[in-house]
Image (cartoon, helix red, strand yellow):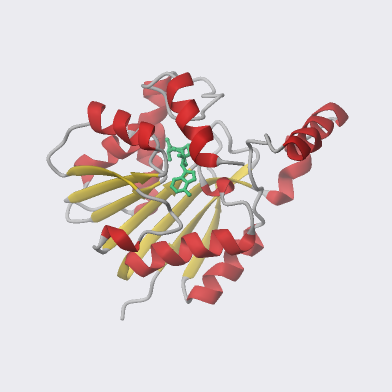
Amino acid sequence: MNWEAFWNQQAEADKPTAQVGRINAGELNSEQLHIRLAAHILEQLNLQPNDQLLDVCCGNGELTALLAPKTAFCMGVDLSPKLIELAKAKHQQPNLHFSRANALQLSGLGRTFNKINLYFSFQYFEDYETGLRVLSEMNALLAPGGRIFIGDTPDATRWRQYYNSPAKIARYYYQKWRGTEAMGKFWHPKEFEKMAEWLGLEVQILPEPADLPYAWYRFDAVFVKALA
Ligand SMILES: C[S@@+](CC[C@H](N)C(=O)[O-])C[C@H]1O[C@@H](n2cnc3c(N)ncnc32)[C@H](O)[C@@H]1O
């Protein structure tokens, strides 16, 4: 899948004020959902007013813009130039910056952060090596004692709960064959543990709070880097 083309096209298809790629917001409207998700991310990252936050795969910046006021400095990066344009046009705050960057190559950002968020996006890294590379790029920018939150990742142990009928499974394999399958990879929590061990990070695998719309088939993870 060419994700840059896919997300550029989503930037035009989706409502610019909605979270990119969200199909089901549960009981909440978009604005309420963004507030709920930002509160959840803030709690998992234990965000503090002097924090330097990087939001990787920030999309149109709807969540980034809610997190920025809780930090000293906040940068959102995304692969899609069109989503970054939308984010820059809509969200202007003195401590908030958006930039086009590939999560596979973050060293060009040229600064370190003590908190890094990657929400609702890890599934687009479609094999173990690519995921490890992304986590390793984030880890390279992470200050000692810093924290990475990877939230809302489809859980491989619940793949059959998601693809729960022959028709859904057939569609999945057909789209895979055509190269149009857009759900990406269901990650196994054990793969997260293995990556953390490789990079020398502590990791906690967490169930999502039950009120979040995709809690039934996704999980969260918090990685912590030791103090030097
Ligand atoms: C479902 S959206 C989530 C956006 C945002 N995190 C949120 O929760 O609202 C997934 C985002 O991941 C971005 N993305 C996918 N692959 C990427 C990569 N290699 N580097 C940076 N961003 C990427 C897409 O452009 C898209 O904006």
Could you tell me which residue is drawn at 63 percent across and 58 percent down? 189
Residue 167 appears left or right of 176? right
Could you tell me which residue is drawn at 57 percent across and 51 percent down? 125
Name the foreground residue: 16 vs 4. 4
Number of callouts in the render? 0
Looking at the image, can residue 96 be seen? Answer: yes
Please state the horizontal and vertical placement of residue 61, each as a whole percent of the image. 33, 35
Looking at the image, can residue 14 be seen? Answer: no
Quick check: 24 above or below 210? above
Name the foreground residue: 164 vs 137. 137
Name the foreground residue: 138 vs 41. 138
Quick check: 167 above or below 142? above
Residue 132 appears left or right of 183? left
Residue 39: quarter of image? top left
Residue 97 appears left or right of 32? left
Q: Quadrant of the C terminus?
A: bottom left
Residue 90 appears left or right of 81? left
Which residue occupies the extreme right position in the image?
A: 166
Please state the horizontal and vertical placement of residue 174, each as a whole percent of the image. 80, 33
Quick check: 77 above or below 189? above
Please state the horizontal and vertical placement of residue 29, each as a whole percent of the image. 44, 18
Please state the horizontal and vertical placement of residue 108, each as a whole percent of the image. 30, 60
Could you tell me which residue is drawn at 60 percent across and 64 percent down? 129
Could you tell me which residue is drawn at 74 percent across and 34 percent down? 175
Which residue occupies the extreme bottom position in the image?
A: 228
Q: In which quarter of the image is the N terminus?
A: top right
Residue 107: quarter of image? bottom left
